[in-house]
Structure formats: structure tokens, C-alpha cells
Image: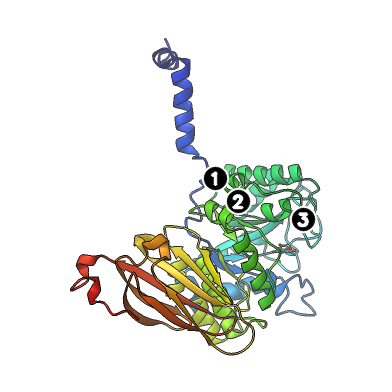
């Protein structure tokens, strides 16, 4: 009797099925794309918002989409300390391709703008300790009109893997039906896995699906490492505001699904560009950390103020964004013009953000009770509180009936972190603590 037969005999048909199910459940647990990637939100740089689709290098050599641009950014990501604080993925967006596929049907880069080819660019980027991201589209064309991957999913996945690509942003333009959209996103996910190369998979599936029907986030999370839900970000407070309002409105669905391996993507960080005031930049950084969002900057690392750079490189904020518990934060209350957000962190800590949405007047004070944070557990019986943004300072020890007062600029945010303290560690018990 063959080994397989004897096992079948011992287990019986039901036993065998149960065993297969158990092995499958272990190998691909329901709920997340378990490709081992994006255990925390990916961090890096993506060209789109700042550089769009300039393909004429003779007219604009410093800003056109070319290998030079990415090599310069790679150099700066290392020399200016971006890589060392975690910004690792250097990502190409739309407009890198030649207008047609090669004679074997493969995507090819524009030969004038990427004369060395993507594999060479990937080598360069890898030699700097960075990873390379690339862009393609599930439909017949990319949003800017370059060749789409429809009908070529396997070939494109293999091409990207053979070039040494580490991340794929897969857009959803020019895809006519919701079924083709879903099938396309799933097929590309499987094709990427089949290459055997670790390639983070960034989807815009829910954004395009939403135009036709309600996204099924449980399904999306099984195939994608992160996904765009909302319209493209642009360099203005209005855009940041829209993202935050939409996210708050849908936060129950969104926070449930986010976690290690799969994240909601509210789109690029536009900090360091032209449109946001200082306080609005603080708000974007703080809230992207609260939302456990991928931190993909779209700015010009050759021209960035030292204040914006320090904000983007703030290690305490990055630590909140990258917290290993991987829980997405949410708004707990809106009180006139103030929004109060919390995010559970590992070790019983909490990140707390107070956003002042008023767009008239000066700084305003917001006073709130610590009693209800973290369902009553964040500061119970006591906690120490650190202010992280807009400046770092220690706000001392508090107990669970304390009120905290913060001063917040219009459209700005105060970001705090509370760490719970057990009663036995508080000398004299909680009553010994001052109430602020
Ligand atoms: C869509 C995406 C953007 C960008 C452009 C490129 O609009 O949402 O993020 O990739 O396409 O054409």
C-alpha cells in the first residue's frame, strides 16, 4: 500500500479533508495577503503628486520622469538620512513606459528617458540599500494612456520580477466592469506571488470599485498589501481635509480591516511642497501616523526646507506610524471645531491627536478628560504623557480622572503619546499625582 493510501485509510475521507483544510488555513490564513511583506506600513517616495507626467526632458531636464530623477532621489535618500529613518521604497509612478510593448509583448521603459533600462536602475537603487517600486494598470491603458496590463498579467509580473522590482502600484483606469477589475487585481496578486520574488502589492481596487459597488474589504485584504480608497491627493489643505473627512465617515469598516500585511492608503504625503502651511503639514504627518498609513512622500528631496525634512524624519512620529501592533487609529469625538483621535499602540500605549479644524482666528485651547481614552484603559490608573508634535515635550504624569489642556493652531494638530503606569509603580498611589 502506498503511503498516501495508508494515510487515507487511517484518517478517512473526512479526516483527510480536515487535514487539507488545516494545512491550507495554516499556509494562507483567511483575512490577509500573507506574502510576508508590509508587516508595518511601507515607507518611501513616489513621484506622482510632485512630478506628474513630464515626459519632455529637453524642455524640463530636472523634472522629467527619467532614470536620472530616480538616481538623484536615491542618492539623497541615503545622504540626507531618509533611508536610515525608514523611507526605503523609491517608487516610479505613471509615464515611465514606452508608448508600446516590445516585439515579445513585454512592457518596456521609454528608451530616451530610461536608456539604461529598469534592471540597471534597480541595481543602482539596491546598491544604495533601497528598494524599487514601479507602476502599471489593471485595464487596457494606464491613467496617462500608456500600455495597460490587461491580458498580460503573468508576463508583466514576470518582467517586473526579472528586473528586480520590489513593489508594484497597480492602478485601475480603463477597466470597464467591476468583475474584470476584481479578476484583474486578483490575477496580478497571484502572478506576483508565482514569480517567487518579494513584491509589495499596492492596489487601487476599492477606489475604482467604489464607483460601481461597495468594496469588499475582506476580499481586498486577501490580495493586496495596501489599497487606495479615495480620490487622488493634491497639494492643498482642502485635499487633506477631504481625505480625513472621508476616512472618519467610513472608519468602522476601514479600521477593522487594517493590520500587519494590509493597510488603507490615504495617498501620498505632500509635506515639503507648496500648498500646505506649517500647521497643515503637521496635521498631515500626525494623522497619517494615526491612520497607520503608508508613508510615501511625493516631494522634491533636492529642494525641501529643513523644517519639513525634520517633520518627515521625526522618529517619534514614525515610531507611532510603524507601531508593531498595527492597529489603525480613529476619531473618538468631534467637539465643535476640535477632533479627538486615538490609536492603540503596543504595550498598552496610546497615540492621541487633537486637530483644530477652525480656519479663522488664532490658537485655541482644547480641554479633555483622560478617563474615556482607550475605553477607559489608556490612563488607568495613571499614565505619563509625551507631546510629540508640533514640538517634543514631556507633559508629565496624570491619573485617569485628569483633564488635559492643549493649545492648537488653526488647521494644526497636537500629537501626544500616553504610556500607562501601573499603580504599584506610582509612588504613594494615584492620589499622589497632580491633576493638570
Ligand atoms: C491615478 C492614480 C494616481 C496616479 C495617476 C497616474 O489617478 O490614482 O495616484 O498614479 O493615476 O496617472
Residue under label 1: 196
Determine which of the numbered discs, if any, sits on residue 173 in the image.
Answer: 3
**What is the distance, in whole Å, between disc 3 and disc 1 at their CAs?**
27 Å
The quadrant of the rendering that contains the C terminus is: bottom left
> Going from the N terminus, do you reach mark 1 or mark 2 first?
2
| Residue shown at 43% from the left, 81% from the top | 405
Q: Is residue 405 above or below residue 49?
A: below
Q: Can you tell which quarter of the image residue 67 is in?
A: bottom right
Judged from the image, the secondary structure of the residue bearing numbered disc 1 is loop
The residue lying toward the viewer, choosing from 214 and 223, is: 214
> Going from the N terminus, do you reach mark 3 or mark 1 first?
3
Few, some or many C-alpha atoms within 10 Å of disc 2 (few <14, some 14-19, many ≥20)? many
Q: Horizontal and vertical percent for residue 133?
A: 61, 61
Name of the residue lying farthest toward the bottom? 362
The residue lying toward the viewer, choosing from 236 and 166, is: 236
Judged from the image, the secondary structure of the residue bearing numbered disc 2 is helix
Residue under label 2: 161
Quadrant location of ligand 1? bottom right
Amino acid at each position: 500500500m502506498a503511503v498516501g493510501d495508508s494515510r487515507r485509510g487511517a484518517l478517512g475521507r473526512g479526516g483527510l479533508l480536515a487535514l487539507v483544510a488545516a494545512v491550507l488555513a495554516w499556509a494562507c490564513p483567511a483575512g490577509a495577503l500573507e506574502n510576508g511583506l508590509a508587516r508595518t506600513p511601507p515607507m518611501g517616495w513616489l513621484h506622482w503628486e510632485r512630478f506628474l507626467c513630464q515626459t519632455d526632458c529637453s524642455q524640463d531636464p530636472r523634472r522629467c520622469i527619467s532614470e536620472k530623477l530616480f538616481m538623484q532621489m536615491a542618492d539623497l535618500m541615503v545622504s540626507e538620512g531618509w533611508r536610515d529613518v525608514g523611507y526605503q521604497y523609491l517608487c516610479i509612478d505613471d509615464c515611465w513606459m514606452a508608448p508600446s510593448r516590445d516585439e515579445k509583448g513585454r512592457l518596456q521603459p521609454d528608451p530616451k528617458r530610461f536608456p539604461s533600462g529598469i534592471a540597471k536602475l534597480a541595481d543602482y537603487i539596491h546598491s544604495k540599500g533601497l528598494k524599487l517600486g514601479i507602476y502599471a494598470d489593471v485595464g487596457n491603458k494606464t491613467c496617462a494612456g500608456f500600455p495597460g496590463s490587461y491580458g498580460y498579467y503573468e508576463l508583466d509580473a514576470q518582467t517586473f520580477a526579472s528586473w528586480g522590482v520590489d513593489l508594484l502600484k497597480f492602478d485601475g483606469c480603463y477597466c470597464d466592469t467591476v468583475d474584470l477589475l476584481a479578476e484583474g487585481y486578483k490575477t496580478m496578486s497571484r502572478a506576483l506571488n508565482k514569480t517567487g520574488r518579494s513584491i509589495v502589492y499596492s492596489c487601487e481596487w476599492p477606489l475604482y470599485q467604489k464607483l460601481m459597488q461597495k468594496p469588499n474589504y475582506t476580499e481586498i485584504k486577501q490580495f493586496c498589501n495596501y489599497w487606495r480608497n479615495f480620490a487622488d491627493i493634491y497639494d492643498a489643505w482642502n485635499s487633506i481635509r477631504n481625505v480625513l473627512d472621508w476616512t472618519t465617515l467610513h472608519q468602522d469598516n476601514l479600521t477593522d480591516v487594517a493590520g500587519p500585511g494590509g493597510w488603507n492608503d490615504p495617498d501620498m504625503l505632500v509635506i515639503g511642497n507648496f500648498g500646505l502651511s506649517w500647521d497643515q503639514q503637521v496635521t498631515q504627518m500626525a494623522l497619517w501616523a494615526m491612520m497607520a498609513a503608508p508613508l510615501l512622500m511625493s516631494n522634491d528631496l533636492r529642494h525641501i526646507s529643513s523644517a519639513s525634512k525634520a517633520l518627515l524624519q521625526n522618529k517619534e512620529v514614525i515610531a507611532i506610524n510603524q507601531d508593531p501592533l498595527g492597529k489603525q487609529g480613529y476619531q473618538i469625538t468631534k467637539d465643535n471645531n476640535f477632533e479627538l483621535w486615538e490609536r492603540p499602540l503596543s504595550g498598552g500605549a496610546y497615540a492621541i491627536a487633537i486637530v483644530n479644524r477652525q480656519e479663522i482666528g488664532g490658537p485655541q485651547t482644547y480641554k479633555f478628560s483622560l478617563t474615556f481614552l482607550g475605553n477607559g484603559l489608556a490612563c488607568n490608573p495613571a499614565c505619563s504623557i509625551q507631546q510629540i508634535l508640533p514640538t517634543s515635550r514631556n507633559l508629565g504624569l496624570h491619573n485617569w480622572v485628569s483633564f488635559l489642556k492643549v493649545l492648537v493652531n488653526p488647521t494644526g494638530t497636537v500629537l501626544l503619546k500616553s504610556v500607562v503606569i501601573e499603580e504599584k509603580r506610582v509612588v504613594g498611589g494615584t492620589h499622589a499625582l497632580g491633576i493638570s
